[in-house]
Amino acid sequence: MHVERTFTVPRPVEAVFDYLSDFAHTTEWDPGTVTTTRTSGDGGVGTTYANTSQFMGRTVDLTYETTAFERPSRVQFRGTNKSATATDTLSFSPDADGSATRIHYRADFDFGFLLNLVAPVVLRGKLDALADETVEQITRTLLNKAV
């Protein structure tokens, strides 16, 4: 299952990419993140992060890896643990004059065969609400940053 949103922020594409492509910044823009620490790499493909998030009252630890890094147009992170895989893809495009950036955010979740059967019924509303909150927090964070 997945959620996705497209929105625009009044910041240049390179600055938006540089900020959001550093997954350690999720502590500032992802409402579910408790902590994220870079564990290896230089920020590009293969960089890994230890992430702790909370969702529906549960604390979850995931190891994230940067799987795509195409500055300034696309970045992708894949988080895994024993029971789930989450893939976050962010795509960026500048507006006509370069002063704003259109962001397409997609989060894909794989909970394993059995949970994938019930997840759309049980989790759809919660994940949609979290996606909306994420858009609001990314926008607010980028507006408050001197990027």
Image (cartoon, rainbow, N blue to C red):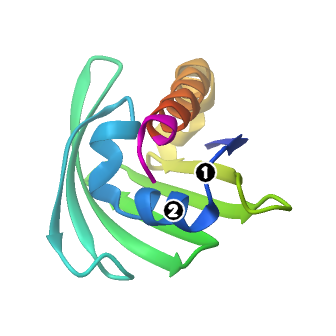
Which residues are the magenta region?
A: 142-147
Magenta-drawn stretch contains 97:
no
Q: Is residue 26 above or below residue 141?
A: below
- Look at the image and tell me in which quarter the N terminus lies: top right
- Specify the amino acid type for callout 2: Ala
- Specify the amino acid type for callout 1: Arg
Alpha-carbon neighbours of circle 1 within 10 Å: few (<14), some, or many (≥20)? many
Q: Single out the residue that lies furthest toward the right.
A: 96
Q: Residue at x 44, y 36 (%)?
A: 141
**Where's residue 140, x and y in %?**
50, 30
Left or right: 66 in relation to 60? right
Q: Residue at x 37, y 49 (%)?
A: 84
Q: Which mark is residue 26?
A: none
> Label 1 belongs to which residue?
11
Left or right: 125 in relation to 68? right
**Where's residue 80, x and y in %?**
32, 58
**Number of marks present in the image shown:** 2
Q: Nearer the viewer, residue 101 or 68?
A: 101
Q: Is residue 115 above or below residue 127?
A: below
Q: Residue at x 60, y 18 (%)?
A: 125
Left or right: 57 in relation to 69? left
Report if the CB atoms under discs 2 and 1 are less than 8 Å apart.
yes
Q: Is residue 35 above or below residue 140?
A: below
> Label 2 belongs to which residue?
15
Residue 80 visible somewhere in the drawing: no
**Where's residue 96, x and y in %?**
86, 62
**Where's residue 145, x and y in %?**
41, 43
- Look at the image and tell me in which quarter the C terminus lies: bottom left
Q: Regarding mark 1 in the picture, which secondary structure is present there? A: loop
